[in-house]
Every structure is written in C-alpha cells, then in structure tokens.
Image (tube, rainbow, N blue to C red):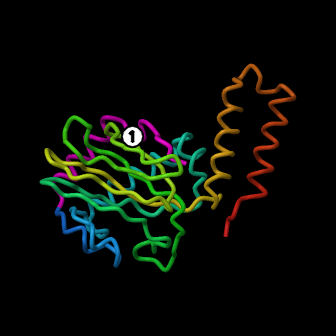
Amino acid sequence: MIHAIPDVLTPAQVAEARALLESADWVDGKTTAGHQAIQVKDNMQLPVTSPVARQVGDMILKALQANPHFIAAALPLHILPPMFNRYSGGQQFGSHVDGSIRQIPGTAQRIRTDLSCTLFFANPDEYDGGELIIEDTYGAKSVKLPAGHMILYPGTSLHHVKPVTRGARLCSFFWVQSMIRDDHQRRLLLDLDISIQQLGPELATHPATVRLTGVYHNLLRHWAELG
C-alpha cells in the first residue's frame, strides 16, 4: 500500500521546522547507511543526536498522534524517531530496500520496519529532480509532494531518490512498526474504515453500520500483534 497523507504539518510548522533545519549542522548520509545502501547513497543527514533533529522530530510525532488519517492507514505500534536528509547538487540515493529492523537510538528497543515514511519540507517547485520512486506490484510510482505532506509505503519496497539538479530536497524519513504486520491486511482494514466513515453521522447508529464497525474491530483484534 502506497498512501499519501496531506497536511501532516501546517504551513506555520513547516516554516518553523525549515528555519531550524537550515541552520543545523549536516553530515554525510553514508555515516548511517548499511552495507548495501552505502554503495548507492549520496546525501546529507542530521546526526540522530542533533538537538534540531530531536526538536523537529518531536513536532512530527506530536502531529502524527493527532492525525486520524495516519492512525487509520498505519495502525502504528511503534514509530522510530524521525531522521532528516537533504539532497542538492546532483545528490541521489540509488535503488535499495530499507533495513528490516531498526534500533531506537539510545535504547535497547528494536522495531520492525513495516512502513517507510517520507515527510516533505520543500515544495516541488523549489527543486528539480528528487522524486521518490517506489516500485510495487503495479509498477513504479513517482512521489514528490507539497511541503507538510507525507507518503507511507511498505518497508519491503524497492525504491530510490532521483538526482536533485536544482535547489534542495529537504525531508524527514522514519519507520513504523504497525499493529498489523501484513500490508494486504492493513489495506483491507483501511478500506473498511474509510467506508464506515463515508456512511456519515446520519447513519452512525444504523444496524448495518454497527455490524460493519464490529467487523472492523473483530478483524483488528484477530490480526493485531501488540508484543
């Protein structure tokens, strides 16, 4: 499931975050790359210990916790603290699959990377190139969203970032361990949830709506992993 979530951050939050990020100290992104990714990765990142990364990351996490669209699509159990990258001057990230397990910095806790997330801080007209290309069952999908918007996609996906030839691509990236491990099951639950919501408040107490809501929760109860 590839799913775009609009307006995770408000324009004011995007402006505040960008001011902080643009004044931060960036390092070579290869310092956090795995054995395969280091061969194809060319970007800049904020160190996970950066105070700016922590401040903007907390802003993102707080916004996600209050975003019903994100909750419905991801059904999150754990979220890795957001990280940040910057591409400019022809930088790119070649085809790769994200690591399956990530350790939360400063802790012994590890999470399974069911969903990869990219939140955009620069608008599409501010830079050329930089499209996130995600390969799925139906072919390659090109993603380049407005500032404040976010894309969710399966952590199992082969993906790459095209070279940035003008301006700078500024994003946050992180991973989610979902209560629902299986991507197909998450898609079914999201479709059911959206259908229930579309019935509207006037049908909220209709017996059919009540039964559909029961089906949703019984499937969630059956499939969820909370360990």
* In magenta segment, residue 184: no
User: What is the quadrant of residue 28 in the picture?
Assistant: bottom left
* In magenta segment, residue 17: yes
Q: Residue furthest top?
A: 202
Q: Residues within 10 Å of mark 1 (few under 14, many from 20)?
A: many
Residue 26 location in percent, x, y? 18, 63
User: What is the quadrant of residue 127 in the picture?
Assistant: top left
- The secondary structure type at the circle numbered 1 is loop
Image height of 206 relative to 175, above or below: above
Q: Is residue 101 left or right of residue 12?
A: right
State how many labels appear.
1
Tag 1 residue: 149
Q: Is residue 57 left or right of residue 177?
A: left
Quadrant in which the C terminus is drawn: bottom right
Which sits in the foreground, 83 or 96?
A: 96
Which residue corresponds to the image point at 47% horizontal and 40% vertical from the top-left?
A: 5
Three-letter amino acid code at disc 1? Answer: His
Which residue corresponds to the image point at 30% horizontal and 54% vertical from the top-left?
A: 161
Q: Which residues are magenta?
A: 1-24
Which residue corresponds to the image point at 60% horizontal and 44% vertical from the top-left?
A: 72
Residue 84 location in percent, x, y? 30, 58
Which residue corresponds to the image point at 63% horizontal and 61% vertical from the top-left?
A: 181
Residue 208 location in percent, x, y? 84, 29
Q: Residue furthest right?
A: 207
Image height of 106 relative to 154, above or below: below
Residue 13 location in percent, x, y? 32, 41
